[in-house]
Amino acid sequence: MSFYYYPMDDPNKEPLELYRPGYLHPVIVGNIICPDPSSNSNRPADLPTGYRILHKLGHGGESTVWLAQGLENPERVVSLKIFSAHCFSAAEREASAVRTSMTSPNAVWAKHIIHLLDDFTIRGPNGTHKVHVTDVIMPMKQLLRSRLSAVKKKELVKGLAQGLAHLHRCGIIHGDVHWGNVGCTMPPRFLTASVRNIMRPLKGFYAMTVLPNDPTQQSASLPAYLLSACDMHFCYEWFGGEDPNVGSEARIFDFGNGVYVPRDVKDKVDTAEDIRRACVPPEVAFAYYAIGGSGYPPTIEADIWCLGVTIMRIFSNEPVIEGRGIWNLIAYAMLDGVLPKAWREFWETSLCSNTSPDQVTPGNADDKWDQIREGFEEQNPQADDDDLDGLISLLRRMLALDSASRPSMEQVLADPWLADGSLPKTVDASVAVLPKSLQAQP
């Protein structure tokens, strides 16, 4: 299908080809999104009967996310995430993980996991879709446009670490930790503002009309227009988010790749790490490129590596590894300084590179980390030497090439850079109560 106007490589708009049966639900501003009565008979009566769309917050291949207001509580704005029809099971998995986190008997750190305010099912021209309603969160990838102090960054990192530790204690693997899936709460003034005042800094709407060249191809599967996401960073600043006296707490969200920790080595999980992701752990990349594995089950160790990469991004505003692909294996190895035997064999037989495996040494890794430290110092001039040294030491442990050498989240939080002596009692993940439908099957 061709169109008169098309957003070529526009990151602010989702691809039009995703609007077809089995994929995204078409939405325009002003739509009322109501639960399908036949699929939501057990929904609590005190929840809104529907939500009106106010603006767009973002999009991905699996969902679109909207700023909305409840019909019965119009002065409270929320985030409304409409999943693609083909991601129905991922949406259920996400809801289950969030509920397990919220109801854990040891929920001291559950506040760092986004809470589900409402979830329901809708039907549309492209299929049946799950809808999740949550508080509005400021994504980290937008938040880092602000000049956060090193102290504020450390507070956010600590909250993320506590949140991930809580998930692991609940027997949940997130499966896709990166700077687009973490963030922080909006400022208190945003939470109490009227809808009129919240809409003011969002600066209107930037839309592109969806008009097929062939008039017979105009269908209900297509939205009337594609809308760019609003600038939540400007909104965050407008309501005082950059004030150092305003507290914003870290939040982890987007659990579509989440799985429960297998209780036995024979247990199976129903999802796998995706090599196309922005943050691919080295063991996943090696399994794909060197062994030919199409998928790698999410692991706690991979979560920890991904959190380490996210911390690096927070303190440097730069990716730990530039680009993607097979050459990243070399960058991973150079960062670690120790080359496993299997990696060396693959490198010598299959990688045509100017970089020799003999260059992977602890000394060269030290030089690489010295460069990273210099970048941290440049981006965080307020941080003292001891604090930067402690951060580098922790990150080197979290980003170990050998997944078995990485610290657990308990050990990460006990690290001198983060520890404050307030670790709550550990919950044994093996006794976490999981929904029967999502327990791993032998």
Image: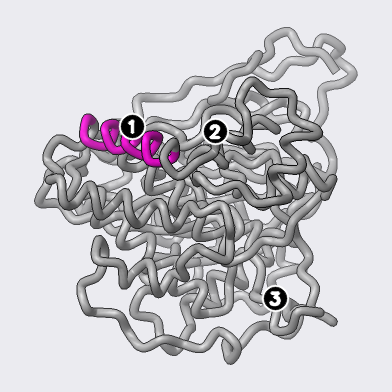
Residue 162 x, y percent position in the rendering:
37, 68
Residue 257 x, y percent position in the rendering:
65, 57
Spatial CA span between label 3 and label 1: 58 Å
Q: Pick the residue in front: 24 or 145.
A: 145
Whether residue 280 appears in this view of the structure is yes
User: Which residue is found at the position 65% from the left and 74% from the top?
Assistant: 260
Of pointers 2 and 1, the one earlier in the residue sequence: 2
Identify the element where label 2 is drawn: helix
Between marks 2 and 1 in the image, the one whose residue lies nearer the viewer? 2
Marking on residue 359 = 2
Identify the element where label 3 is drawn: loop
Query: Residue 374 colored magenta?
Result: yes
Which kind of residue does numbered mark 1 sit on?
Gln
The region drawn magenta spans 365-378
Marking on residue 41 = 3
Query: Which residue reaches farthest front?
Result: 358
Which kind of residue does numbered mark 3 sit on?
Ser
Contact check, label 2 and label 1, Cβ < 8 Å: no
Marking on residue 371 = 1
Query: Does 25 sit left or right of 221 as displayed?
Result: left
Of pointers 2 and 3, the one earlier in the residue sequence: 3
Identify the element where label 1 is drawn: helix
Image quadrant containing the C terminus: bottom right
- Label 1 packing within 10 angstroms: few (<14), some (14-19), many (20+): few
